[in-house]
Amino acid sequence: IVSDRISISYIYYYPNPMKGETNFVFNNTGPEDIGKVRVKLYSVSGKLIRELEYIALTGVNQILWDGKDADGDFVANGTYLYKIVVDNNSDIESKVQKLVVLK
């Protein structure tokens, strides 16, 4: 299903829980040229630890995260939040979900 409005759905990551790296997967049912997608990773206290950018297409998209923070260090075991933000300059869609790191 394709519409003229941005819509992201079926958001998940695998492997779950993650050990070293993970893939964020989501479905975009909006227009083909939606621009940048950002995945923002936060600690449970709300500190931004990493931001990934990706150009998404209509359909299923997958973004790889290597498990490292902005300084290049692997994150510790625990629970984190990730926010997927899709922005095509006229519409913005975002979703927030939990992520578990267990090494």
Image: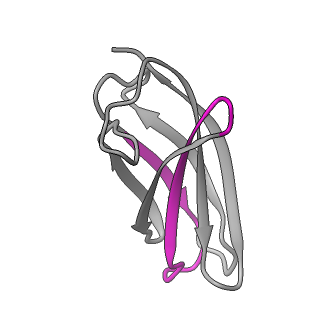
Which quadrant of the figure has residue 23?
A: top left
Give the number of marks: 0
Residue 73, position in %: x, y?
Answer: 31, 36
Q: Is residue 6 above or below residue 88?
A: above
Q: Is residue 33 above or below residue 50?
A: below
**Residue found 61% across the figure and 61% down from its top:** 85
Residue 84, position in %: x, y?
Answer: 58, 54
**Residue found 68% across the figure and 57% down from its top:** 94
Q: Is residue 36 above or below residue 53?
A: below
**Residue found 61% across the figure and 51% down from its top:** 9
User: In the visual, does 61 lie left or right of 74?
Assistant: right
The quadrant the N terminus occupies is bottom right
Of all residues, the one furthest to the front in this rendering is: 71
User: Is residue 93 or residue 8 the one in the foreground?
Assistant: 93
Q: Is residue 67 magenta?
A: no
Specify how the rendered protein is coloured. one colour
User: In the visual, does 96 lie left or right of 51?
Assistant: right
User: Is residue 66 or residue 9 the one in the foreground?
Assistant: 66
What residue span does the magenta drawing correspond to?
A: 23-46
User: Is residue 74 or residue 82 the one in the foreground?
Assistant: 74
Residue 62, position in %: x, y?
Answer: 38, 53
Q: Is residue 24 magenta?
A: yes
Which quadrant of the figure has residue 68?
A: top left
**Residue found 50% across the figure and 51% down from its top:** 26
The quadrant the C terminus occupies is top left
Q: Is residue 60 above or below residue 90?
A: above
Residue 30, position in %: x, y?
Answer: 60, 72
